[in-house]
Image: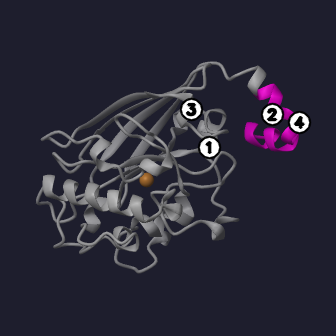
Amino acid sequence: MRARNVMTTLGVAAVPLIFAAPAQADTVNFSLFEQNGSGAQAQATITTNSDGSMKVSIQGSGFTPNAPHAQHIHGAPQGDFFCPTASADANGDGQVATEEGVPQYGGVMVSLTTQGDASADSGLAVDRMPVADGSGNLNYERTIPAAMIPEGIVENVDNLHIVQHGLDVNGNDTYDLESLGESVFAKSLGVEGIPEEATNPATCGEVSPSGGVETGGTSTEGVESLPLLAFGGMALAGAAAIVVLRRRLVQAAERV
Ligand SMILES: [Cu+2]
């Protein structure tokens, strides 16, 4: 039985024990493979610390150069989510868009920002997301404080996965509207004119098979209740948050 199932069985009574004996420092490796033909790939390491913080390191290549790439830890502590397969391409356009991937990869648990807030609320904070260099390499390292990490995440890192967004379908080294048009996801939040290229997943990674950790099943049980918002947290966002989001996305689009 997997560790998280044991925790579920123990239920509420186990909670004081979890707080009394925080997890030891532990390192979990992730292999991120390309999504949507992005040509990008990455290796990631998450080290959970005894103080409840989490160091995340990512080294990737093949990303849209000089462009910000939103990246998140997706899934749920006890959820059975996984990196999307081609079956998630609901409209058959050959791309698993952000909103199409949600039922398989789950919502955002942690936004892998470079500074400041790292909650799901910062899922689209592209001004605080890592930017690939001129050669398309993307390197990221940050220790995320315990206070920014939802309960249950540190103990269940091996059940989660990492998604990086933003790709260049037509190979012109920028996000544009020509190949995929406007982002359906951004538009669903009231943000017009953002390229779909900027929001579609470029990589997704589960725990490396070489790490000897079970990588989870393929059940979609329970996903029906998920909001249709892959970046997570934005379902509850008010009008003010949408305005901020629009500004951030427009700035990002202008920058690239
Ligand atoms: Cu994401």
Sequence-earlier tag: 1 or 3: 3
Which SS does the magenta portion mostly show?
Answer: helix
Q: What amino acid type is highlighted by mark number 1?
A: Asn
* Pointer 2 with pointer 4, Cβ within 8 A: yes
Instruction: Specify the label residue 147 is tagged with.
Output: 3
Q: Nearer the viewer, mark 1 or mark 4?
A: 4
Q: Nearer the viewer, mark 3 or mark 4?
A: 3
- Whole-number angstrom distance, CA of label 1 to CA of label 2: 19 Å
Q: Nearer the viewer, residue 50 or 103?
A: 50
**Along the horizontal axis of the image, is 4 left or right of 186?**
right
Does the magenta-highlighted stretch encompass residue 168? no
In the picture, the quarter occupied by the N terminus is top right
Task: Judge the density around disc 1: few (<14), some (14-19), many (≥20) Cα neighbours within 10 Å.
Answer: many
Q: Which of the 4 image quadrants contains residue 213?
A: top right
Instruction: Specify the label residue 13 is tagged with.
Output: 4
Q: What amino acid type is highlighted by mark number 2?
A: Val
Q: Nearer the viewer, mark 1 or mark 3?
A: 3
Point out the residue furthest to the bottom here: 91
Sequence-earlier tag: 1 or 2: 2
Secondary structure at badge 1 equals helix
Q: Name the residue at 46% across, 70% down.
A: 100
Q: Which residue is mark 2?
A: 15
**Along the horizontal axis of the image, is 195 left or right of 121?**
left
Q: Which residue is mark 1?
A: 159
**Along the horizontal axis of the image, is 88 left or right of 25?**
left
State the extent of the magenta-drawn residues as a range.
Answer: 1-18
